[in-house]
Amino acid sequence: MSTSLILLIILIVGLAAYFAGRARAMASSKGKLSALHSLPGYHGVYVAIWAVLPAAFVLAVWLLASPFFIENSVRSALPDTVKSQGAATTELMLGQVMQVANGLKRLSSDELAAVTSGSSNLREALAAKGVPMANAGEPYMVEAAQHYNSLRDGSRWVMSLVVLIIAIAGAVFAIRGISAPFRARNRVERVMLGTLLVASSIAILTTVGIVGSMLSEAIRFFQSVSPSAFFFGTVWDPRFSAAGSGGTEGQFGLLPLLAGTLYIALVAMLFAVPVGLFAAIYMAEYAKPVVRGIAKPLLEILAGIPTIVYGFFALVTVGPFLRDISAQLNGLVTGNYVNFIQAQSVLTAGLVMGIMLIPFVSSLSDDIITQVPRSLRDGSLGLGATRSETIKRVILPAALPGIVGALLLTASRAVGETMIVVLAAGVAARMQLNPFEAMTTVTVKIVNQLTGDLEFNSPQTLVAFALGITLFAITLCLNIYALYIVRKYREQYE
Amino acid sequence: MNMMSEAAVEKALDQKMNTVPFKMIGKDVSVYYGEKRALFDVNLNVRENTVTALIGPSGCGKSTFLRTLNRMNDTIDSCRVTGKITLDDGDIYDPSIDVVELRARVGMVFQKPNPFPKSIYENVTYGPKIHGLARTKADLDQIVETSLQKAGLWNEVKDRLHESGTGLSGGQQQRLCIARAVAVSPEVILMDEPCSALDPIATAKVEELIHELRTNYTIVIVTHSMQQAARVSQRTAMFHLGNLVEENDTDKMFTNPDDQRTQDYIMGRFG
């Protein structure tokens, strides 16, 4: 029986259990619905849960665990000549056995008999059925494959039976428990709570898993490059990981990348913060509802544009524009038409990233500004303050912690931004202060180190994980600090 | 008025109210919120150095009328005011009038205490700084002290002027808001249910304060409490469904009103 069929059967049992539970509850109410503690539907759901959940759980565990046991059994049945050749060969042979087992299922009984007796070539017989084999195959493989197949089929039948029995037993158990005062509603509520809990723990566990895998790879990197050389190195020159090039180890200095990241983020923030903040103040304080209704969604469309599109925009429009205009300016002043802004530069990347960040700044700040109670505005206006005095002296100071929090959240986005800088910032890892020159960022280098055909055992690729975990740590700190500030601010008005 | 002794002022006030001159005159005042009309041709005059109480059931327009007196309704987009309101014979809705200056002359205290999230000192100096009432730090200190004294708060907060105003108790916050309004040296103080968020003890303190303030200021107070209106005011105006029902001396209003609706409201038959 296939897994989906079993699932379907479980669901049908569940459905039947639902109606049975309902009917049972109706019957025990003796025609008076109010005599029941819970509505009949709850009793139905309760019984259905008992029918489906334990069965599905056993099914899942069985499906996960059984291959492990079957493979163990097959592995121990392999001839000693194979096992003596080490773990790698054993695994390879096991893989072949499974391949054969897969193929054997497609053979007719005649062909199967021919193969087992050795009268026909195993490799050719399987190839005819579309199952390729790496070598001619050996007689013990057929034997092991048959063993494997029989184990698998047996396991499947037992599983189907067990799961079905559990489903029906669960339903019967639950139905027997139903009576008028039975609190099915509360039980169902608890299952709902459990479901929600599982959903949120999946999200959290995924984060933990990602961090864990990054950490383990980063630790492998730090085994070949010392942490001090990475964190305090001023030269980024990873070289290539050519085969056997043990002597030409690159230099993995984080500082030039970090400097570029922070510099570009700074330029972006310098651009985005005033524009975004002023836009937010206009939206929150001055705009008439009609204007606000139109302008705010328009502004937020900016946030929906994929960052790669911003990257194009930087590469094709902003970069060349800045380059040409700088050439013109230079020509007007010195007579020498040489551009002093590179097409790929800190300024280009920062400017375009700033545009991307405007809606984040404005939308977050807008929310915070509108949260300032109206009574404070009235109080200030009632004392004869003008609108802008009220904003400057009362509203912004009151909203400041929240706005700082919003800016920190925005900064963490700027630091982690990838596609814009990949296209607009350049790849030159250097430490300098001229915003018109190209610099590079942590994210760009992660992309660089991980593109192409690579093996994940050289420091040249593993450095990407070290970079990633560093970036993660920076943005995490920014986010935590921002949330802390925002939360502290909220308490003021509650 | 400042030249007169306090006792003389009291005496003058206790004379027949009708002899006290008008500070603000409202003539045919109507207010619209969008299509909805909230006030219908209200004619109500506010007498100088008098506490005028506006009473009436919820939604009767008393707060709306109060807010027309310093044009706080301007902050509501859909609101429109017709008719004429004068302050010392000057039309406050005249286009040449600076609304900012008007609000400095006609201060306001709100229903919920709304101190700014700043220090007590900064709360009081907020208005004077904006209007340039003080040149030096010493001037500001003086304003803070006298304003807090007038609001009866000085002794409670003089040692912690630089702590946050939001850390005070509700009653103290409301008196801080009164001090803040007083600091601008207004001529008229509008109070929109100033005690509705306060406990009885704090209420008593604020009422006492209102009583003292009237020697220097003209006060208009909106209240839901008839007892409060009777305790603090000399004149009372009764609103109902956007109309001014009756305006009279408080004593007469609560003993022998002219209008049946006032009688009913005061007796608690509706509202």
Image (cartoon, helix red, strand yellow):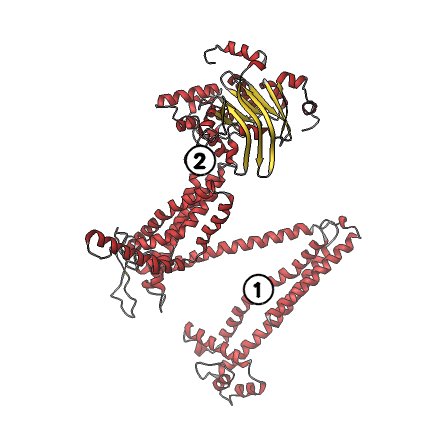
Q: The disc labelled 1 sits on which kind of residue?
A: Ala
Question: Hey, which quadrant is residue A429 in on the image?
Answer: bottom left
The answer to whether any part of residue A473 appears in the image is no
Q: Residue at x 40, y 27 (%)?
A: B131
Above or below, A1 against A393 in this view is: below
Q: How many marks?
A: 2
Q: The disc labelled 2 sits on which kind of residue?
A: Arg
Mark 2 lies on a secondary structure that is helix
Above or below, A134 against A422 in this view is: below
Q: Which mark is residue A60?
A: 1
Q: Position of residue A273 (x, y in %)?
A: 38, 46
* Mark 1 closeness class: few <14, some 14–19, many ≥20 residues within 10 Å: few
Viewport quadrant of the N terminus of chain A: bottom right
Q: Residue furthest right?
A: A30
Could you tell me how far apart the alpha carbons at marks 1 and 2 are, in whole angstroms? 64 Å
Q: Residue at x 66, y 19 (%)?
A: B254
Q: Which mark is residue A387?
A: 2
In the rendered structure, the residue with mark 2 lies on which chain? A
Q: From the viewer's perspective, tell me whether residue A124 is left or right of residue A419.
A: right
